[in-house]
């Protein structure tokens, strides 16, 4: 079992920045692919960014050039640096830990609210 705790959300003006952090429990963090999803009111949850256990990253087209995902295995933490924020980035952001293979595992954090508004 992995517990994920997100932090760093809040209210920011358009054009501003936030850094989200997701701290994971346990000693197998380095084996998990880590992802950030978001869900806006009335919309489906969407994948925003992901980083593999080996450090390969991927970003949704809507955030490329503005968001960066990184991980610190020594701290069991994954980060989402969000720059040039837009009102359409407003959503609850969720951290996900994914372990693939014969038996897959997925764990979710409780979510953190990001609101971009003037």
Image: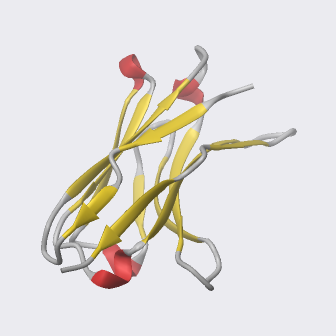
Where does residue 105 sit, x and y in percent of width and height? 77, 40
Q: Residue furthest left?
A: 15
| Horizontal side of residue 36 vs 102, given as left or right | left
| The C terminus sits in image quarter | bottom left
The residue at 36%/84% (across/down) is: 88
Where does residue 73 sit, x and y in percent of width and height? 41, 24
Q: 6 or 103, which lies in front?
A: 6
| The N terminus sits in image quarter | top right
The residue at 59%/35% (across/down) is: 32
Q: 9 or 28, which lies in front?
A: 9
Where does residue 113 sit, x and y in percent of width and height? 44, 59
| Horizontal side of residue 10 vs 106, given as left or right | left
Q: How is the image coloured?
A: secondary structure
The residue at 37%/17% (across/down) is: 74
Q: 99 or 22, which lies in front?
A: 22
The mark tally for this picture is 0
Q: Is residue 111 above or below residue 30?
A: below
Where does residue 24 sit, x and y in percent of width and height? 53, 28
């Amino acid at each position: 079992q992995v517990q994920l705790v997100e932090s760093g959300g809040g209210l920011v003006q358009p054009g501003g920045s936030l850094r989200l952090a997701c701290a994971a429990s346990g000693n197998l963090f380095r084996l998990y692919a880590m992802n950030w999803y978001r869900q806006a009111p009335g919309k489906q949850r969407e994948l925003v960014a992901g980083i593999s256990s080996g450090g390969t990253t991927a970003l949704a087209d809507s955030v490329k050039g503005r968001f960066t995902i990184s991980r610190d295995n020594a701290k069991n933490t994954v980060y989402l640096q969000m720059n040039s924020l837009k009102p359409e980035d407003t959503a609850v952001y969720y951290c996900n830990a994914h372990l693939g293979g014969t038996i897959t595992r997925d764990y979710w954090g409780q979510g953190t609210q990001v609101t971009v508004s003037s």
